[in-house]
Amino acid sequence: MRIAVIGAGPHGLSALKALLQNGIDAQAFEREADLGGNWNYGAQTSRVYRSTHLISSKPFTQFPDFPMPDGYPDYPSHFQVKEYFTSYARHFGLVEHIRFGSEVVSVAPVGDGAIWTVTVRDRHSGDLHVEEFDGVVIANGHNWNPKVPRYPGQESFGGEIIHSADYKDADVLRGRRVLVVGAGNTGCDVAVESAQNAARTWHSTRRGYYYNPKYLMGRPSDQTADLLLALRIPLAVRRQMFKASLRFAVGDFSKFGLKKPDHRFFETHPIVNQQLVYYVGQGDITPADDVASFDEHGVTFTDGSRADVDLVVFCTGYLVTFPFLADADLHLDWHEDHPRLALQVFTSKHRNLFVSGLIQPDSGQWTLAHWQGMLIARFLEARQLRPVVADRFYADATAQSGRRFSAGTTYKDSSRHYYEVAHQDYLQSLQDAINALEVPA
Amino acid sequence: MPSRPVSHREVITALPAEPTGRPPLLMVHGIAHAAWCFAENWLPAAAAAGFPSYAVSLRGHGGSAGGRRLRRTLTRDYVHDVMQTITELPEPPVLIGHSMGAIVAQLVAERYPLRGLVLLTPAPLHSAMGDLVAIARDRPADLGRAVLGQTLSMEPEVLFEGLDPATARSYSDRTSTESPLVQWELLLPQRVGPIRCPVLVIGTPQDRLVRVADVERTARSHGVDPVWFPGMGHDVMLDTGWDGVLDTVLDFAGDLPPWGRARPQG
């Protein structure tokens, strides 16, 4: 059995490692000349900017079987993250299983789908090369294809508009009048860098959010949060504790001119940014309403106010795209803008087509990447050794396609939060799935 | 809460003259010992046989930092130290744990895909209560010391059978203090998840710290039979006959399938 892995970012690497570790031969394809995917700073598909640091702390973000070095800080930089992935790949002998500079241009099943053909373009020579595999793990990432909004009058705008996908460092902001659109973690980072570098900064957000600190009670805040989880503090109480701690440390966000959150804690993807409120308080960031329209000199917001700006940075997120899969709706059960998956990994359409990395956890990512890879490997192993168990598992799992892992909350704005998972809930589900595959036939 | 790192970790290394393709060996010492106990005989001999060999001193032991916090150190801190050491190795190692270090090694094997696991006179994961009772019968004063949080006796007669008295005494004198919390933790039954790598368990019938029954139970939990070395004491890497034990370990390590090439057992 030989499996293709598309992409050598963190999810591609952990899938590759899990397969090899479980005695399954695998070949990964990476379009860039180096591994790291999004964290391969400077590469065409990388979306990290010079100042990017992790926003979940080291112990919750690392691969559980390959801890980050003790010398790393609580929140490592993207340079350190890339170095970490490189040593992971070297340690487990993954590099010899990765073909670099190789862009997968097509993935298609042969006949009933027992075999897949993978067509790869060598980016150096331009040559196409076709190979057959017994299965495919899609790990091409979901944070690279920019989602760009359209507003009335946008064509007449005389200034510059960029998406955060093309934001690399603060040079572009220096001395300009900047509007940052979007209050995701990137939007908040860029707004802060703009506050430090631009002449003026507006920050347009659709709603109010809870801007979480990176530290709480002397610990990275995700560790404090997980301590409460470990103590089995109920959701309602945890909500109140988090609200109270923010209220105590910062106070009512609306007093700073920020919008009041229209949702409860844990109902949107957490934003970790301690500096945003600080710069709002210093007057370096002017909070603004949703954008209504553009004109030649700037924008008008939905509350009627306007701002003259010469640079707009859309931090409006990314679209999930599998450009190599011609019939994504057929092969991955596509619904609107996303595939309908079981456990965010399996599709009911094919037993040998897997997706890894289509998750956005409220905590670190790569612990989950590790267990997604292990689940795929153990499923393939079970298909060989205990087919009855594997079949039963697959039927049970795919019967629950589309199930969410929200640990009891209801996410706001479901399209943005389709990939959102509550890490404790999702991790438990992955563990249960792996255990179900371990049962003797 | 994650373990707090220490500022320095001692790793003693012995490498073959040139690369041989053999798997690295990482050795973890037991109570009150440190990397020196492997550096004495095993590291040079294993390197000469073509195995890149490493021995780590857990925090608060040997040349590693952490002595001042030793009284607050837990087994999970030792697991952290070994995991950190592993990530610095060029490839997945065969992990060799002696005594209490065997517990650390099994906890590592639970979360990390080792090439192979070797347990030398392993302290039992299922609780050392039985050993403590045996120790109490054998050396009642020791029981009191252990209960009060003092380090178990590392006197020559506890550790060695065949060594000449002077050498035995010199090794015994090199032992240090152990974390009382870790010693008490030995009494608690611990569980590890399935370990998928090949396992070798080594014991001696004359062991004055770990009972034969406990070695047998540890081996059974991994689906193997222990290999016995009669006539030796608890410190099988130092006592007379250490070379025979090492040969068995190296045979095991040399026969392991390459990592990521063969289906693991279990």
Image (spheres, rainbow, N blue to C red):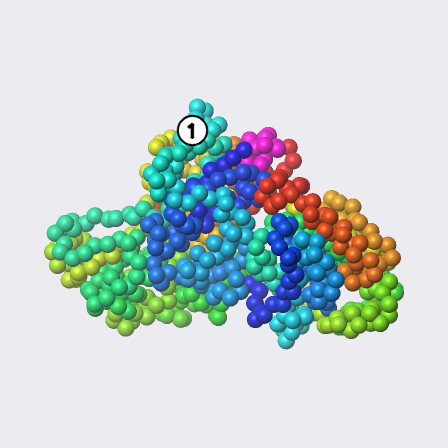
Residue at the extreme bottom: B68
The magenta-colored residue range is: A380-391
- Residue A158 x/y as whole percent: 13, 56
Residue at the extreme top: A111
The residue closer to the viewer here, A10 or B170, is: B170
What residue is at 76 percent from the left and 52 percent from the top?
A: B247
The residue closer to the viewer here, B128 or B161, is: B161
- Residue B226 x/y as whole percent: 79, 49
Membership of A274 in magenta stretch: no
The quadrant the N terminus of chain B occupies is bottom right
Q: In this view, does A29 lie above or below B172?
A: above
Q: In which quarter of the image is residue A193?
A: bottom left
- Residue B10 x/y as whole percent: 63, 67
Q: Can residue A346 be seen in this view?
A: no
**Does A348 sit left or right of B10 as displayed?**
left
**Does A306 sit left or right of A11 as displayed?**
left
Membership of A381 in magenta stretch: yes
What amino acid is labelled 1 in the image?
Answer: Pro
Judging by the rendered image, the residue that carries numbered circle 1 is A109
Q: Is residue A179 visible?
A: yes
- Residue A127 x/y as whole percent: 35, 36
**Does A377 sit left or right of B156 as displayed?**
left
